[in-house]
C-alpha cells in the first residue's frame, strides 16, 4: 500500500503541473487517496 500511495502522489504532482484548476484538487485532497487516484485517471 505504501508504494501505491507514493505512486499516486507522483501522478498527482505531475497532473497538478498539467491541470491549472487548483480548486478541483483541493476538493480531491479532502477525499481518500484511492478516490484521488481514480479522478487522476479520469482527468487523463
Image: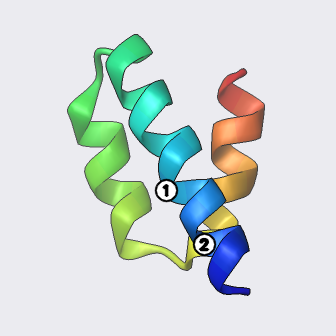
Dot 2: few (<14), some (14–19), or many (≥20) neighbours within 10 Å?
few
Residue 44 found in image quarter: top right
Horizontal relation, residue 26 to residue 28: left or right = left
Nearer-the-camera pick, 4 or 18: 4
Q: Which residue bears the numbered disc 2? A: 5
Q: Quadrant of the N terminus?
A: bottom right
Q: Which residue bears the numbered disc 1? A: 9
Residue 36 appears in the picture as rendered: no
Secondary element under disc 2, as helix, strand or loop, is helix
Residue 33 found in image quarter: bottom right
Q: Position of residue 2 (x, y in %)?
A: 63, 84
Q: Position of residue 15 (x, y in %)?
A: 49, 27
Instruction: Report the label total.
Output: 2
Horizontal relation, residue 21 to residue 11: left or right = left
At 26% from the left edge and 53% from the top edge, which residue is drawn?
26
Q: Position of residue 36 (x, y in %)?
A: 58, 58
At 60% from the left edge and 72% from the top edge, which residue is drawn?
5
Secondary element under disc 1, as helix, strand or loop, is helix
Horizontal relation, residue 40 to residue 42: left or right = left
Dot 1: few (<14), some (14–19), or many (≥20) neighbours within 10 Å?
some
| Contact? badges 2 and 1 (CB < 8 Å) | yes
At 23% from the left edge and 33% from the top edge, which residue is drawn?
22
- How is this picture coloured? rainbow
Horizontal relation, residue 31 to residue 4: left or right = left
Position of residue 41 relative to residue 3, above or below, is: above
Extreme residue in the front direction: 3
At 48% from the left edge and 74% from the top edge, which residue is drawn?
31
The span from disc 2 to disc 1 (Cα, nearest Å) is 6 Å
Amino acid at each position: 500500500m505504501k508504494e501505491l500511495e507514493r505512486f499516486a502522489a507522483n501522478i498527482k504532482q505531475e497532473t497538478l503541473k498539467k491541470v491549472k484548476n487548483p480548486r478541483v484538487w483541493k476538493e480531491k485532497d479532502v477525499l481518500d487517496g484511492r478516490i484521488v487516484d481514480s479522478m487522476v485517471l479520469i482527468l487523463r
